[in-house]
Image: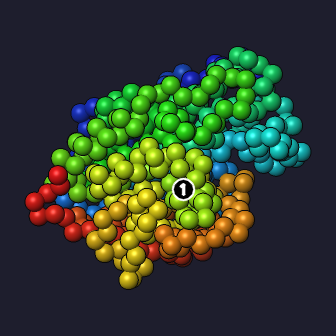
Amino acid sequence: NSSSYFATFDHHVHLTGLTAATTYYYQVGDPSTGFSQEFNFQTAPANVGAEMSFKIMVYGDLGIVNSDPTFKRLKANRDTVDLFWHLGDISLYLETNSKWSSSGEELLGVHSVYIWRRRGLLYEQAIYNDWMKELESIAAQKAYMVSPGNHEAECHSVPCQVSSEKLNKLGNFAAFNSRWRMPFKQSGSSSNMFYSFNFANVHFISINTETDFEGAASDHYTLGPAVGGFGDWVKWLEADLIQATKDRHLRPWIIVGGHRPVYTLITCDKDGMPSSDARALQKAMEDLFEKYQVDLYVSGHQHSYERQLPVFRGVPELQQNLSIYANPTHTTHIVAGMAGNVEAHADYGGSPHQVWNAVKDDSHYGFGRLSVINSTDLFWEFIGSDSGDVLDAFTLHRERPVDGYS
């Protein structure tokens, strides 16, 4: 009921004075209600130069339904990587499942808004909470970085539609910004919706592909508060890239992640140019990617896997060997929205092949594993969740300018 729901809180703790590359042990709770089991985490390594190596897991659109194999693989491989990056649509809490409701769901044609036949506030209490419990063994011990997606925008559950109080409290990415606390203040951002962080020899940037730029897709389908108003992330992005470029002698790699892709076979015209929301995103940031030599852009949104060639303004840099991108001058784009959720796989509907597409997989669930080898080589793998096999892999090799970056 509403009284018990609104009596819940999300707690965030900011730890200071930690030593690099050190394991810390902790428990969560208080004497009156008890404490959790003991967990531990290891702090990031000290920045000891550009030749460091580490691994991360990268994916988007991980829900409850169709995700058991992915969760199993991620948990089994937790201690082989240093951090996780979830590129939006976190839990896809517009889902339902027989564990909550035997009656299933209705899908309206207009705006594809889900309305639940089960009583209760599924949006937060059942779906998001259950998903977080599933994630606990990972996020309690590894850095779990997140980016906002369209499913984070607002509450579509029936109790929200009949209660203006719930609708207003759970509108405009409220659940995302309450449950997750990313290092936005530390990176000069005005909002939890976009931020950056350094890990070893990589500068990571998480962007807001959902709001606050010209032509942004509307994630607003209710009578609740409008979405947006989080600040000019495009202006912030350039300032962040300027500083990252100055620091490239320490962190030669710049990797950007966001929920929506720029290049995908699903959202492009017959000539291969991004269309619709992808076109708006391209106009907002592709020139910045080119100017500041962003190495890699990883996204989700499409529930599939796509690996593109390095590309700029629709024109790819053709590679003699698709397993090694040798010294490209443009950004490489990857779509990694195949982790598994109630919407299953993306429907390509006969989308034609484009010259900038190297690999497409719309039949497997899986996740990305990115290995930073050194200052000149990244190794990317698409891992199938059911088999654990490597379904696609390539090396991104970029020689660094002797005189640095301008």
Q: Quadrant of residue 13?
A: top left
Q: Decide if residue 404 is on the left or right side of residue 70.
A: left
Which of 113 and 84 lies nearest the eye of the viewer?
Answer: 113
Q: Quick check: 352 above or below 259?
A: below
Q: Is residue 35 visible?
A: no
Q: Hey, which residue is sitting farthest front in the picture? A: 271
Q: Decide if residue 250 is on the left or right side of residue 16.
A: left
Q: Position of residue 375 (x, y in %)?
A: 22, 64
Residue at the spot 28% in from the left edge and 51% down from the top edge: 292
Total count of labels: 1
Q: Decide if residue 233 is on the left or right side of residue 70.
A: left
Q: Position of residue 237 (x, y in %)?
A: 35, 40
Residue at the spot 36% in from the left edge and 65% down from the top edge: 371
Q: Is residue 249 visible?
A: yes
Which of 388 and 364 lies nearest the eye of the viewer?
Answer: 364
Residue at the spot 27% in from the left edge and 63% down from the top edge: 53
Q: Position of residue 85 (x, y in %)?
A: 46, 51
Locate the N terminus by quadrant.
top right
Q: Quick check: 220 above or below 251?
A: above
Q: How is the image coloured?
A: rainbow
Residue at the spot 44% in from the left edge and 32% down from the top edge: 192
Q: Decide if residue 351 is on the left or right side of residue 389.
A: right
Q: Hey, which residue is sitting farthest bottom in the picture? A: 320
Q: Quadrant of residue 317?
A: bottom left
Q: Quick check: 363 above or below 321?
A: above
Q: Name the residue beneath numbered marker 1.
A: 274
Task: Give the structural element (helix, strand or loop) at label 1.
Answer: loop
Tag 1: amino acid: Pro
